[in-house]
Image: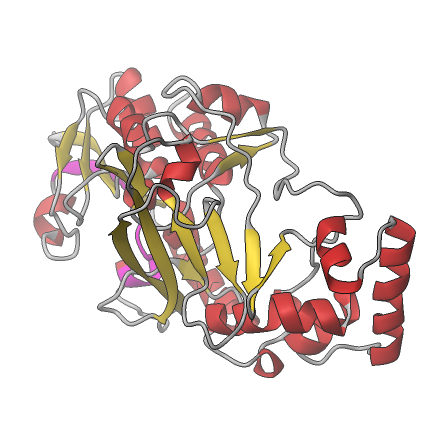
Amino acid sequence: MKEYDYLVVGSGLFGAIFAHEANKRGKKCLVIDKRSHIGGNIYTENQDGINVHKYGAHIFHTNNKEVWSYINNFAEFNRYTNSPVAIYKGEVYNMPFNMNTFNKLWGVITPKEAKEKIEEEKKKANINEPKNLEEQAISLVGQTIYEKLVKGYTEKQWGKKAKDLPAFIIKRLPVRFTYDNNYFNDIYQGIPIGGYTKIIEKMLDGIDIKLNCDFFENREELEQKADKIIFTGMIDKYYNYCYGELEYRSLRFETEKQDTENYQGNAVVNYTEYEVPYTRIIEHKHFEYGKGDKTIITREYPDVWTKEKEPYYPINDEKNNALYEKYKELSEKDDKVIFGGRLGKYKYYDMDKVIEEALNLVKIELD
């Protein structure tokens, strides 16, 4: 008899939901995390009364009523609506591209005028078969929007020139012919009052947790503890890179207190020119309508990933996706482990999709 039914590697949303549901059904779980805290990338830390999103802005949004109902069992959400702005060479634009953006760019007032302007630029570019990301973006929104709001941001994000990136990375660019600054179209949206960490704490209440515990440093011992492993880390690393290494992008964060009550007037401000090295500044207090005479900001820098750095999102190009399929085939023959989350599934998941995936696994594995 093993000590546990499940070893859950990673205490982010996916691992915490599975452990919570397994525990409810009388299964014994051990949750481990290599970091010094639970919560994975949604971890929030209270600093001077402000819940700081330690690993980038996490704004919950979904159209899935089941997911929304589920997450509301663990927290009350406020009515925060994501309305980011973009700064390009001292000019401020609304995101996503909407009538406010088009008015600022060209002075147009009606949707008809905006559509005509975009079509005029697309026609002038005359790109029928885009060969790279630059041509793809221009063929979708024209030269002006591309130059000011897409080019620099994208090149920073991927660490490559837009001309050297494949066209399929940008399948569409959201263009809205309304004066609505709401970034997401989802019905349900908000930020948990008190931060995300409280959600994970509630999920893992009564479950054995081991922090500062690296699975790969203690693999032999940990594998003996449970009948099955729920693994939310890198699938290629789990299999010792036997088919080769998958590629990821990393992020670097610089967080600092500001001796002012309001630094930038918005929770998320994107910087779209290439010469500004960070992609955005997050002002955390605005997520929860915070008061007080101090504020905390985080500059977010895209970074080249190496094995010493944190992998934040997969590079889902054709080469990497084909390599992932080989690891996926290997995992399907392996009855000891189940993979989940962004790194386990090598897919860029939003939080609601992670919850959906975790609840689907619960139905298959536990019900």
Query: Residue 288's x, y, as percent?
Result: 40, 31
Q: Is residue 234 magenta?
A: yes
Residue placed most toward the observer, 366 or 90: 90
Figure quadrant of the C terminus:
top left
Image height check: is 295 above or below 362?
Answer: below
Query: Residue 88's x, y, as percent?
Result: 57, 67
Residue placed most toward the observer, 259 or 112: 259
Range shown magenta: 225-237
- Tell whether 222 sits left or right of 159: left
Report if residue 279 is visible in the image.
yes
- Tell whether 257 sits left or right of 315: left
Residue placed most toward the observer, 27 or 184: 184
Q: Residue at x 69, y 62 (%)?
A: 171
Residue placed most toward the observer, 153 or 136: 153
Report if residue 98 is visible in the image.
no
- Tell whether 365 sits left or right of 215: right
Q: Is residue 166 magenta?
A: no
- Tell whether 266 sits left or right of 35: right
Q: Residue at x 33, y 33 (%)?
A: 196
Query: Residue 62's x, y, as percent?
Result: 56, 33
**How many marks overall?**
0
Image height check: is 271 above or below 53?
Answer: below
Query: Residue 18's x, y, as percent?
Result: 34, 30
